[in-house]
Image (cartoon, rainbow, N blue to C red):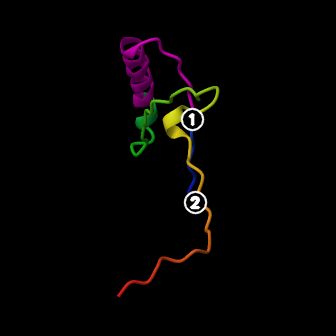
């Protein structure tokens, strides 16, 4: 049987310096887990806050053209 344990830690950092400090502390804690579990992995991902309000004008989709049924003129 195979098991996977997932630990999630949400961190709010004001800048990259503070984020790096958190990362160093978590990596030090991870060393304790790697002693009994040498294949343990650690991944950091930057999460961005969700945008609030209406989408920006350049992100709005254009309406699809409606078919008119009119064909192009045939020319020899």
Q: Residue 37 falls in which quadrant of the image?
A: top left
Q: Secondary structure at mark 2?
A: loop
How dense is the environment of label 1, judged by Cα within 10 Å: few (below 14), some, or many (20 and up)?
few
Query: How far is the residue under mark 1 from the one under mark 2?
Result: 48 Å
Of the residues under marks 1 and 2, which one precedes in the sequence? Answer: 1
Q: Position of residue 9 (x, y in %)?
A: 56, 27
Residue at image mark 2: 65
69 over 39 or under it: above or below: below
Looking at the picture, tell me which residue is in the foreground, 65 or 74. 74
Looking at the picture, tell me which residue is in the foreground, 71 or 66. 71
Residue extending furthest bottom? Answer: 76
Query: Is 42 a magenta residue?
Result: no
Q: Residue 64 falls in which quadrant of the image?
A: bottom right
Q: What numbered label is drawn on residue 51?
A: none
Q: Which residues are magenta?
A: 7-31
Mark 1 near mark 2, Cβ–Cβ under 8 Å? no
The residue drawn where x is 42% and y is 41% is: 41
Q: What numbered label is drawn on residue 7?
A: 1
How dense is the environment of label 2, judged by Cα within 10 Å: few (below 14), some, or many (20 and up)?
few
Q: Secondary structure at mark 1?
A: loop
Q: Position of residue 2 (x, y in %)?
A: 56, 57
Instruction: Kindly report the secondary structure that dominates the magenta region of the rendered protein.
Output: helix
Quadrant location, the C terminus: bottom left
Query: Is 20 a magenta residue?
Result: yes
Q: Position of residue 32 (x, y in %)?
A: 44, 29
Looking at the picture, tell me which residue is in the foreground, 20 or 56. 56
Tell me the mark number nearer the camera, choosing from 1 and 2: 2
The residue drawn where x is 46% and y is 11% is: 14
Number of numbered callouts drawn:
2
32 over 3 or under it: above or below: above
């Amino acid at each position: 049987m195979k098991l996977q344990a997932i630990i999630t830690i949400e961190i709010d950092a004001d800048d990259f310096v503070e984020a790096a400090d958190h990362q160093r502390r978590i990596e030090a804690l991870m060393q304790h887990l790697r002693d009994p579990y040498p294949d343990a992995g650690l991944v950091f991902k930057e999460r961005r806050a969700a945008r609030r309000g209406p989408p920006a004008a350049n992100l709005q989709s254009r309406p699809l053209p409606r078919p008119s049924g009119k064909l192009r003129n045939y020319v020899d």
